[in-house]
């Protein structure tokens, strides 16, 4: 009778060991999946950022040129567009803590909990 009890205990121990190993593999797969998702989103975000910078650059240059041509003063056109960009930067900095950062934080937390 002792032999069958030991065999059952060994079977339970083996099953628990297999369960732990399977769970460890599952956690590794989840980590790799999260890392791959994070990396791909980061690369896509950097790509969008670079394209956005070029769009703003050429749109700003074109607008400055157009305003300068209309005013017959190129320097004024470029300073007006530069002032507009400075104004947008100041608005962004002043509203960052109250609106922009909480909005981004909520998006990140929502994405983390959607994966779980």
Image (tube, helix red, strand yellow):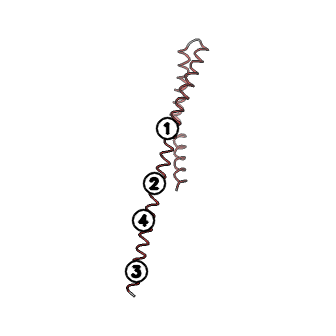
Q: Are marks 1 and 3 in contact (CB under 8 Å)?
A: no
Direction bottom: furthest residue:
1
Q: Are marks 2 and 1 in contact (CB under 8 Å)?
A: no
Direction right: furthest residue:
70
Q: Which residue is mark 2?
A: 31
Q: Residues within 10 Å of mark 3 (few under 14, many from 20)?
A: few
Q: Nearer the viewer, residue 83 or 115?
A: 115
Q: Are marks 4 and 2 in contact (CB under 8 Å)?
A: no
Q: Nearer the viewer, residue 66 or 30?
A: 30
**SS class, disc 2:** helix
Name above or below for residue 20 compared with residue 79.
below
**SS class, disc 1:** helix
Name above or below for residue 17 compared with residue 37.
below
Which of disc 3 and disc 1 is earlier in sequence?
3
Marks 2/3: CA distance? 36 Å
- Residue at 40 percent across and 78 percent down: it is 9
| The image quarter in which residue 81 lies | top right
**SS class, disc 4:** helix
Residue 87 % position (x, y): 54, 27
Which of disc 1 and disc 2 is earlier in sequence?
2
Marks 1/4: CA distance? 37 Å
Which of disc 4 and disc 1 is earlier in sequence?
4
Q: Residues within 10 Å of mark 4 (few under 14, many from 20)?
A: few
């Amino acid at each position: 009778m002792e032999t069958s009890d030991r065999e059952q205990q060994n079977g339970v121990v083996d099953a628990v060991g297999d369960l732990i190993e399977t769970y460890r593999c599952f956690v590794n797969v989840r980590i790799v999946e999260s890392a791959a998702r994070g990396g791909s989103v980061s690369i896509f975000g950097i790509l969008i950022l670079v394209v956005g910078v070029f769009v703003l650059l050429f749109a700003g240059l074109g607008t400055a040129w157009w305003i300068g041509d209309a005013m017959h003063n190129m320097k004024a056109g470029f300073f007006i567009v530069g002032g507009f960009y400075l104004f947008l930067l100041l608005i962004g900095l002043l509203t960052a803590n109250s609106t922009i950062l909480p909005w981004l934080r909520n998006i990140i937390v929502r994405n983390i909990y959607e994966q779980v």
